[in-house]
Image: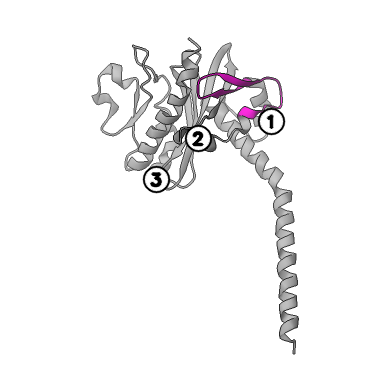
Amino acid sequence: MYSNAYIFRYAGVMVILVAAILSSAAMFLKPMQERNEAVDKMQSILSAAGIENVTTENAIELFNNYITDMIVVDNEGNIVDDFKGDGKENSEAFKLNLKEQLYNKSVNKDFKLPLYVLEKDGQKINIIPLRGVGLWGPVWGNIALKNDFNTVVGVTFSHKSETPGLGAEIETPAFESQFPGKTIFNDQGEFVSIGVIKGGVSNFPLDVQRHKVDAITGGTITSNGVNDMIQNVLESYVPYIQKQG
């Protein structure tokens, strides 16, 4: 029969051994996890701009082919970094933690924001990453604007844990397809964002419909989260956009 001391030593050795194995596995898998996250991010950015047939196999190549500039702007609208060339996944703009930067904004600290410039059919498209909060967790995505920094080309949305059939519908074509052609400034040049509203966009005057989309049926809180996300993030870019006019 084994003594208590033997049992404790054996258990201690096994704990250390398992911890070492798990640590080694995490270190081994980390580069692959980071690559998968980068590829997902690239696919979302390209899709927002209308680039089709993007797969995990060709995402990096297409990203480097289509994206011409990886820009970082500060809260005053100044460009603080502009990366060109290949290897854009290693640029500051691509690696910038949007969650941290938006938190800095919320506590009135200086912040920086990424902007991806894509060229398609001779036209420049500006892609802005989005991040906010839904009902059960974070929601995020990208919104692509024409070179007028006003008209929406397309969007992509995603989420971590929104309710299937309700809030999770934000990442479906039925919801995302409402955004192309909408504008984020009114005729007076004032920033108005794009509102995600209940009650039917068609009930509004035509000049207001250009800045609204219909909310998800039964997904009020998630829809409100997307509305707030778009408002909060896009208004952060207004100082930069105003300097491009």
Q: Is residue 86 visible?
A: yes
Q: Give the distance between the C-alpha atoms of the residues marked 2 and 1, in whole angstroms.
A: 23 Å
Q: What amino acid is labelled 2 in the image?
A: Asn
* Nearer the camera: disc 2 or disc 3: 2
Percent x, y of residue 32: 69, 44
- In contact (CB < 8 Å): disc 2 and disc 1: no
Which residues fall within the magenta stretch? 69-93
Residue at the (70%, 68%) spot, across then down: 15
Q: Residues within 10 Å of mark 1 (few under 14, many from 20)?
A: few
Q: Give the distance between the C-alpha atoms of the residues marked 1 and 3, in whole angstroms.
A: 32 Å
Q: Give the distance between the C-alpha atoms of the residues marked 2 and 3, in whole angstroms.
A: 22 Å
* Nearer the camera: disc 2 or disc 1: 2
Q: Residues within 10 Å of mark 2 (few under 14, many from 20)?
A: some
Q: How many marks?
A: 3
Q: What amino acid is labelled 3 in the image?
A: Leu
Task: Check if residue 77 falls in the magenta segment.
Answer: yes
Reading the image, the residue beneath label 1 is 90
Left or right, 150 with respect to 117, comes to left
Q: What amino acid is labelled 1 in the image?
A: Asn
Q: What mark, if any, has residue 135 been given in the picture?
A: 3
Percent x, y of residue 96: 60, 33
